[in-house]
């Protein structure tokens, strides 16, 4: 948490002025009991009504000045806290963007969302309260004790005895609850993870009639969170009653001691009232301080979780500049490449070696979990190969500047994702300054012209969050168009035609063969028909390359490919297609 305070450096004025106004308010509050004492001893006892009125007006004036100071302090504290939170979230989001897929996979989506929202808001509330109360409450507590000693030292010893006891209670509870709040936040991650999975997979859950099972799973996670929150809440809740008991015992002792001293003539009635008011101020401020410490405790727990993300360093680094271009006919080259995911027991792909020439179409096929997506995700360097080397245009991809590497590649991921906005907004992710003519050309090549024509606003038809107002096939074609807009040197289609019918798939493959600029195309598919015309087909089985060659060559030499092909075409189709 302390390390996160660097984001407050942009608001020194607000922090100083906000704290200053709070201390001014506290100073005026400490004067009030003295004025009440003067009213009782000098005004009421002697029947001097004008004096009482004058002092009452002074109290009103102090109240108004205190109100102005309180509002000013709240304004500057809120400005500093919200600015701090804005910078924190911005830096945190930027840092998350700099992490590789490996770190994001390790963190988990639900944990990332919690840190960006719940944890950041908790820290913001903590900063706000600290600026307002962290100095004010101790200032009033010790200020009231000092003022009590100026009135009567013997009676004020009650203050000196009560404050250490209260401090032990407050800080003891804080030390107990800090680790407990950390556990609560971790369990909150679990609840959010279950919720996200249920919302994301609502259709699957209903299709398999698993609603009751998922409800039970959520209730189990939620009940665990509730139990943990109740436990730590009970401990935190002890703060107020314990402080009330200690302060009220101190008040009783104060009144008993003061009563004897009034009888002796050592103290006046006004002195006793002032001492009682100072004790009440201490009670109120210690309760505020206790609540503040609870908030600080939660903020520290949240701050530690956020700082944990900041301390995660990207597992891959990129050079500041790319090397000079070299003459090479090889668009992509894999040299004995392997990848083992973090914390995985075995490599997902291993021993991969092949060369893709410029303008070639490379098909990647294999069973589910054979490593097809893993293979193509290595090309744009979403993950770093744990063994071997990958070259693009004859240059190792580790030597490329990130922007230069990614600019060469257009990728259509396995899951078609559209963002809220318009169709044109989504397509311009591929090329920010693309004209409508360029967008329409990409749409035509992606076989999505009918999608645009069917929409009243054409390219400027609104897109709902995640593209919910489009079918799966429409989303796939639009994501293909988004990749085609940038006219990439390397185009990767990661099983991006799975929702298309065979006719549309065939038309798409035909248009890809006619792409201008002869890009190198990687087609990942489980359909043999989608890759049978590729210049080179790579067959994967359990992460290893078990076949390389053309369609005809693999039918003769690769049992895995032949099995896939024969499972998708009957004998008559095979005779016709032969």
Image: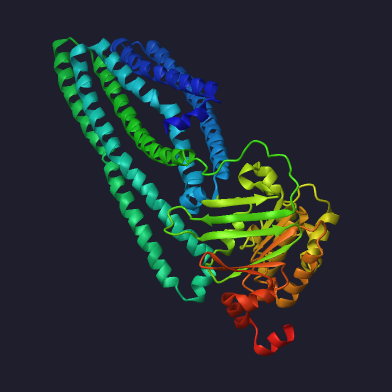
In the rendered image, is residue 105 in sight? yes
- Is residue 327 shown left or right of residue 59? right
Identity of the residue drawn at 79% across and 47% down: 433
Identity of the residue drawn at 78% across and 72% down: 507
Residue 144 percent coordinates (x, y): 31, 18
Residue 35 percent coordinates (x, y): 36, 14
* Picture quarter with the C terminus: bottom right
- Residue that lies at the very extreme toward the right in this rendered image: 437
Residue 275 percent coordinates (x, y): 26, 19
* Coloring applied to the structure: rainbow
Q: Which of these two is toward me, 79 or 206?
A: 206
Q: Which of these two is toward me, 495 or 180?
A: 495
Residue 208 higher or lower than 332, as above or below? below
Snapshot quadrant of residue 235: top left
- Residue that lies at the very extreme toward the bottom in this rendered image: 572
Residue 227 higher or lower than 182, as above or below? below
């Amino acid at each position: 948490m302390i390390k996160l305070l660097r984001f407050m450096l942009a608001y020194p004025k607000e922090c100083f002025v906000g704290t200053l106004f709070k201390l001014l308010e506290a100073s005026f509050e400490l004067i009030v009991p003295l004025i009440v004492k003067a009213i009782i001893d000098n005004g009421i006892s002697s029947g001097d009504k004008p004096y009482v009125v004058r002092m009452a007006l002074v109290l009103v004036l102090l109240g108004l000045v205190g109100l102005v100071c309180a509002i000013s302090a709240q304004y500057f504290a809120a400005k500093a806290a919200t600015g701090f939170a804005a910078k924190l979230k911005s830096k945190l989001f930027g840092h998350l963007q700099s992490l590789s897929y490996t770190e994001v996979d390790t963190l988990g989506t639900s944990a990332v969302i919690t840190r960006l929202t719940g944890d950041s808001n908790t820290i913001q509330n903590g900063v706000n309260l600290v600026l307002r109360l962290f100095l004010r409450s101790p200032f009033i507590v010790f200020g009231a004790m000092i003022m009590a000693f100026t009135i009567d030292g013997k009676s004020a010893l009650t203050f000196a005895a009560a404050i250490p006891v209260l401090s032990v209670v407050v800080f003891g509870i804080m030390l107990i609850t800090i680790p407990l709040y950390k556990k609560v936040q971790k369990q909150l991650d679990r609840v959010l993870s279950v919720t996200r999975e249920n919302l994301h997979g609502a259709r699957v859950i209903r299709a398999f009639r698993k609603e009751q099972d998922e409800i039970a799973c959520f209730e189990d996670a939620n009940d665990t969170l509730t139990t943990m929150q109740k436990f730590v809440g009970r401990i935190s809740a002890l703060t107020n009653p314990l402080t009330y008991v200690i302060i009220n015992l101190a008040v009783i002792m104060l009144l008993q001691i003061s009563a004897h001293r009034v009888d002796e003539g050592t103290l006046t009635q006004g002195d006793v009232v002032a001492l009682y008011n100072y004790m009440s101020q201490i009670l109120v401020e210690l309760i505020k301080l206790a609540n503040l410490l609870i908030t600080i405790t939660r903020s520290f727990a949240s701050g530690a979780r956020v700082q944990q993300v900041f301390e995660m360093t990207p597992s891959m680094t990129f050079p500041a500049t790319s090397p000079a271009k070299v003459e090479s006919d090889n668009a992509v080259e894999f040299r004995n490449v392997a990848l083992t995911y973090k914390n995985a027991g075995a490599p997902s792909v291993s021993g991969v070696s092949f060369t893709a020439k410029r303008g070639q179409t490379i098909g990647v096929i294999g069973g589910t979990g054979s490593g097809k997506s893993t293979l193509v995700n290595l090309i744009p360097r979403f993950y770093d190969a744990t063994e071997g080397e990958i070259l693009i245009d004859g240059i190792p991809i580790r030597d490329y500047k990130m922007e230069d590497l990614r600019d060469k590649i257009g990728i259509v991921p396995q899951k078609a994702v559209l963002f809220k906005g318009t169709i044109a907004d989504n397509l311009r992710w591929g090329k920010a300054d693309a004209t409508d003519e360029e967008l329409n050309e990409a749409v035509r090549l992606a076989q999505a012209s009918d999608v645009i024509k069917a929409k009243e606003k054409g390219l400027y038809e609104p897109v709902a969050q995640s593209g919910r107002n489009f079918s799966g096939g429409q989303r796939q074609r639009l994501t293909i168009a988004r990749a085609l807009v940038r006219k990439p040197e390397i185009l990767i289609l990661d099983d991006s035609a799975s929702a298309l019918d065979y006719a549309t798939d065939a038309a798409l493959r035909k248009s890809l063969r006619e792409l201008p600029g002869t890009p190198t195309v990687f087609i990942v598919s489980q359909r043999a028909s989608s890759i049978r015309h590729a210049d080179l087909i790579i067959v994967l089985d359990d992460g290893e390359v078990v076949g390389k060659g053309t369609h005809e060559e693999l039918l003769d030499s690769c049992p895995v490919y032949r099995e896939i092909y024969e499972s998708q075409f009957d004998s008559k189709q095979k005779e016709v297609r032969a």
